[in-house]
Image (cartoon, rainbow, N blue to C red):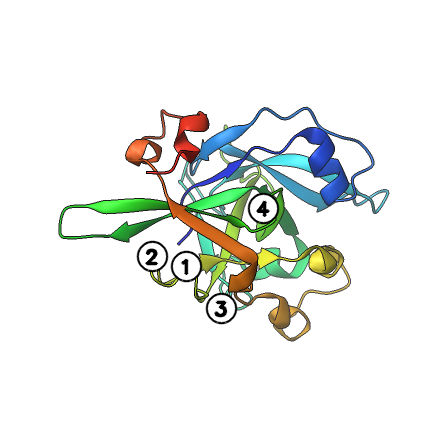
Amino acid sequence: MCGRFNQTASGDEIAEAFELETKAALAPRYNIAPTQPVPVVVLDPGSGSRALVERRWGLVPRGALGKERGFINARAESAADKTAFSEAFARRRCLVVATGFYEWQQVDAKKRQPWLFQLAGGGPFAFAGLWEPAAAFEGAASTCTILTTQPNDVTRPVHDRMPVILPPESYARWLDPRLGTRDELHDLLVPFPAEAMTAYPVSTRVNNVAFDDPACLAPA
């Protein structure tokens, strides 16, 4: 499961990394939690260019009848076949913009140690995501979820799942509206190379969603 991440890159860095025509004025986010708005890259249906937009984290299928929290994650192995995700997998894929994500390691019966995972070279990257338009109930918003896969050697000691991180050369395929079946995209939904990632334990400050500041990134 991926239940918390951060995004601290500037608008210029994101525009360059994701080949956006315009940059966005983004405030750094150090402790992004479910139900909060998150930055995602989608294809503009009119121009075909990439656009940075916001989606609320926690995918709520359009047929939902109430204000549900939604699906934070979807398993990459089965998302194409699950009722809640199959249409989004076929038609509404996105890049969830991040600079790192957190997982919690069970140390003993009472203690869980948070770890921060980032790319070895630093900078922004993309989780493979799916999104849904706003459901029919009042106050609904467009929502998204992050796909997860098996852990690599960096994440395995901490957690048995990891988010699908897409390399830049795969962004175009993931967003391509002409593609949409599991067979066409399954090779993208794999663990990111362990040698291209770093990890270290951080303060339990990140456990509290009220804290969203650089101290969340400080080594424990």
Q: Nearer the viewer, mark 4 or mark 3?
A: 3
Q: Residue 210 placed where, x, y %?
A: 36, 24
Q: Nearer the viewer, residue 166 or 80?
A: 166
Q: CA distance from mark 2 to mark 3?
A: 23 Å
Q: Which quadrant of the structure image shows residue 51?
A: top right
Q: Earlier in the sequence, mark 3 or mark 1?
A: 3
Q: CA distance from mark 3 to mark 1?
A: 21 Å
Cβ atoms under marks 2 and 1 closer than 8 Å: yes
Give the residue drawn at x 65%, y 61%: 90
Q: Earlier in the sequence, mark 1 or mark 4?
A: 4
What's the mark number on residue 78? Answer: 3
Few, some or many residues within 10 Å of mark 3 (<14, 14–19, 20+): few
- In the rendered image, which residue does mark 2 sit on? 158
Question: Element at badge 2?
Answer: loop
Give the residue drawn at x 70%, y 45%: 42
Question: Element at badge 3?
Answer: loop
Q: Earlier in the sequence, mark 4 or mark 2?
A: 4
- In the rendered image, which residue does mark 1 sit on? 155
Q: Earlier in the sequence, mark 4 or mark 3?
A: 3
Q: CA distance from mark 1 to mark 4?
A: 29 Å
Label 3 sits on what residue type?
A: Ser
What's the mark number on residue 132? Answer: 4
Q: Residue 195 placed where, x, y %?
A: 54, 62
Q: CA distance from mark 4 to mark 2?
A: 30 Å
Q: Nearer the viewer, mark 3 or mark 1?
A: 1
Most extreme residue toward the right, as rendered?
A: 47
For residue 83, above or below residue 36: below
Q: CA distance from mark 4 to mark 3?
A: 17 Å
Q: Residue 113 placed where, x, y %?
A: 27, 46
Question: Element at badge 4?
Answer: strand
Q: Earlier in the sequence, mark 2 or mark 3?
A: 3
Q: Residue 163 placed where, x, y %?
A: 49, 56
